[in-house]
Image: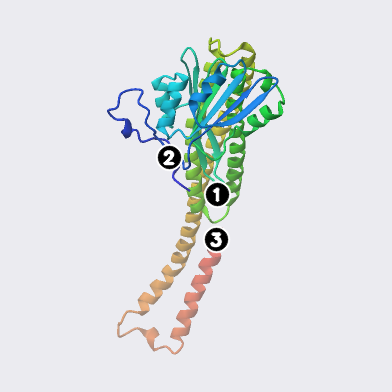
Amino acid sequence: MNDPMSRLTRNRSRKSGLPPGTPVHIGERKAGAPRVSLMYYDDEQLVEEEVTDLSACRTWLSRPGVTWINIEGVHQIDLLEQAGTVFGLHPLVLEDIANTGQRPKAEDYGEYLYIVFRMLSLHATTQEVAGEQVSLILGTNFVISFQEGIEGDAFSPIRGRLRTAKGRARREGADYLAYSLIDAIVDGYFVLLEALGEQIEALDERMLTNRAREVARTIHLLKREMIWLRKAVWPLREMINTLQRAESPLIRASTGVYLKDVYDHTIEVIDTVETYRDVLSGMLENNLSLLTTRLNEVMKVLTVISTIFIPLTFIVGIYGMNFRYMPELEWRWGYPLVMLGMAGIAVALYFYFRRKKWL
């Protein structure tokens, strides 16, 4: 398992000395070529296609329906700069999109809203929390989403609903689409937390075995995962609250009701993360207590053994002295009697400790 602590900070030295608004990719570079997809829909039709030239998207934005443009691969700075030129994005927005360590937030740029948050999932093989930044540009009749990854995302259910025209998705505007994307991300948090909860339960059972040192290391790594989760989730509450209270005409009052529901889900996620953090802290303390108890038990056994052998060592020490006149040395039964006496002392001390319940 990789060290999650490295994800809490990003290397920003590459931007040192550059003017504000300069897009420089900061974060993990994803493998694969960038991909741009477009979906245009209204209550009667749906058009879906791959885009090779962003300039061709301008004609779709002039239509009355909703246009959703998804750009995967923000490490390609040329593609970001082209998107900024085609869609009229502020240089600071492009800078934030390229810097994949952004804190979840929502900013109003007048003609559009800039929304950024994190998509989280559990890696299938390493079982560590993986995440990527997702940025949304919400306009009057369009949504532009920027993702780091190339291999899939959490937006597949949204695409499925749009294709089948189920629910309200095809009848609502761009603000409802933006809400749906945020809601899909938050729903993914519950799946992640459920998997982490199962790991914590299994860890609690393992803690009662003799593998306390391995358990302590796993608890420590999970606590770091929770720190990273908290950093990703806590600002999300503020971001959604900003969207709820925004006086922008881009968000209708009918969509605000759904944002309130996402806000409630976010609070539930935060409460679960805090609960898991408390549980892990308690488990770590219990694990340390178990280690201390087992060490005390070992020390107690060793102390009892040492106490039993102290009088025996004393007797052996006496008869190990090379004095010439020691009457017992001349006795025929001296050696058996000494050995029998030593055995009797050991047995007597043993039963004495058992009576005191020290063994």
Count of picture labels: 3
Label 3 element class: loop
Viewer-side residue, 240 vs 144 = 144
SS category of the residue bearing label 1: loop
Q: Report crowding for label 2: few under 14, some 14 to 19, many 20 or more residues within 10 A (C-alpha).
A: some
Q: Label 3 sits on what residue type?
A: Leu
Q: Of the two numbered discs 3 and 2 on the same chain, state the one appearing first in sequence.
A: 2
Kindly report which numbered mark, 2 or 1, lies closer to the viewer in this rendering.
2
The quarter of the rendered structure image containing the C terminus is bottom right
Which label belongs to residue 89? none
Q: 73 or 50: nearer the eye?
A: 50
For the residues labelled 2 and 1, the Cα–Cα distance comes to: 20 Å
Query: x and y percent of residue 291 in the render?
Result: 49, 52
Q: By what rule are the colours in the image chosen?
A: rainbow
Q: Nearer the viewer, mark 3 or mark 1?
A: 1
Asked if the residue at tag 1 contacts the one at tag 3, i.e. Cβ–Cβ closer than 8 Å, the answer is: no
In this rendering, does residue 235 appear at all? no
Q: Nearer the viewer, residue 287 or 226?
A: 226
Horizontal and vertical percent position of residue 300: 48, 58
| Earlier-in-chain disc, 2 versus 1 | 2
- Residue with the mark numbered 1: 125
Using the image, determine if residue 351 lies above or below residue 211.
below
Residue wearing tag 2: 29
Element on which disc 2 rests:
loop
- Residue 221 image point, x, y percent: 48, 44
Q: Earlier in the sequence, mark 3 or mark 1?
A: 1
Of discs 3 and 2, which sits in the foreground?
A: 2
Residue 324: name its quadrant. bottom left
Instruction: Please name the residue shown 53% across and 66% down the image.
Output: 350
Find residue 359 and name its label. Answer: 3
> Would you say the residues marked 3 and 2 are in contact, meaning their CB atoms lie under 8 Å apart?
no
